[in-house]
Structure formats: structure tokens, C-alpha cells
Image (cartoon, grey):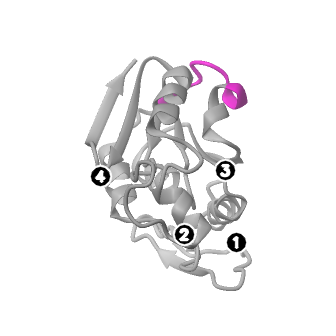
Amino acid sequence: MEQTLKVRLNPGERLDDLQRCGYCIIQNPGNFCFGMDAVLLSGFAFARSGDRVLDLGTGTGIIPILMAAKTQAAALVGLEIQHESADMADRSVIYNGLQERVKIVEGDLKEAADIFGAASFDVVTCNPPYMIGNHGLTNSEEAKAIARHEILCTLEDVISQAAKVCRPGGHFLWYTGLFGWQRLFR
């Protein structure tokens, strides 16, 4: 797939090939780059044709972009609180020409139900921070610390909001090193 859309790369950013449908993602190794957990979660997650999918704490948008490559979901939304990550995710969506299906929203996942409304998604995914409280070494880089530690949200916040935005009969899927793969049905 030949890319004709041009997007800017800010200092320190790189364009990484996702090896799926010719898609690429913009990342900044100085901030935070997606890990294998996100790739595995996107493989574990599923969406039917026409489904609406929400990824809580999407970071640079890896899960919605990979799910766009493998599903016929009608809409994939990534919610991200960190401006720089949300901006990279949005530019990756544009670069890949996915604006019709993938949308990045900058906001706090603790307000997901207020932002999107109750029961508004068929599938909710999340690769939440996996370090609880003061466990482990906290990275001095704020973006990495927020992604890995319960600084801006807890697992309880994630589960609470997922339960609110997930439609009856929908699915919430997440992965943490602490609990492994989890799937909840509403």
C-alpha cells in the first residue's frame, strides 16, 4: 500500500512499520513506545462487522490501528489523556488514511461515560497501567511513568468506566502483567 498522505514528525519521533496492511505508527522512544502487551491484546480482542470499539488509554493508538487492520468494526475510538501521545495517535490515523473508521479523543478515561455516553460501545479494550501504587521503580520520564504506574488512573477506574460505556451483551478485554488476560461480558 503506497502512502500518499503526508504527516509531520516532531523531533525525536519515528515512523514504525506495523507489518499489517502497510500501516505505520508514529512513536517517540523518549516518551513511550507500545509494547508486546498491546500487540497481543489487539490479537486477543475481537469485533464483529459494524461494532463500535473503544480503547481506554490508547497511547499512540496502537490497538485501534491494529484492530482496524483485522476487523470490520464500523468505528474504533482511542481515548488518551496525554496530549503528546494523543497527537501522535491522531497523526498515525491520518498517515494510514483511517479517518473514516478510527478517531482519537483526548480526555481522561475516568470520564469516558461522560464523554461518550452510557452503553455506547460493543467492545472496550484497555492495556492499563500494571504497577500498583509504589511498587517497582517509577520511570523519571513522566509519559512512561503514567503508562506503567497507577498515577492518573487505577484498574478500578478502568473497570468502572468500561462497565458504563459497554453495551449490554458487549465485551471488555484487557491485559495486565498482574492479572493476565481478562474478558468480561456485560
**Residue 66 seen by the camera:** yes
Disc 1 crowd, CA 10 A, few/some/many (<14, 14-19, 20+): few
Q: Would residue 77 be found to the left or right of residue 62 on screen?
A: right
- The residue most toward the top is 168
Q: From the top left corner, tell me how far across and down residue 178 is, in percent.
A: 28, 47
With respect to residue 54, does 147 lie above or below? below
Q: Position of residue 134 (x, y in %)?
A: 44, 54
Return the mark for residue 25: 2
Residue at mark 1: 5
Of residue 31 and residue 86, the one placed in the foreground of this image is 31
Identified by mark 1, the residue type is Leu
Tell me the kind of residue under disc 2. Answer: Ile
What residue would you read off at disc 3?
Answer: 81
Between label 1 and label 2, give the one nearer the viewer: 2
User: Residue 44 sits in which quadrant?
Assistant: top left
Mark 4 falls on what kind of element?
loop
State left or right for residue 124 relative to residue 113.
Answer: left
Q: Residue furthest left?
A: 180
Residue 142, horizontal then vertical, whole percent: 61, 66
Mark 1 or 3, nearer chain start: 1
Res. 50 in view: no
Magenta residues (range):
114-123
Q: Which residue is mark 4?
A: 177
Q: CA distance from mark 1 to mark 3?
A: 26 Å
Which residue does the image show at 66% across and 66% down from the upper left?
88
Depth check: give the residue in front, 141 or 3. Answer: 141
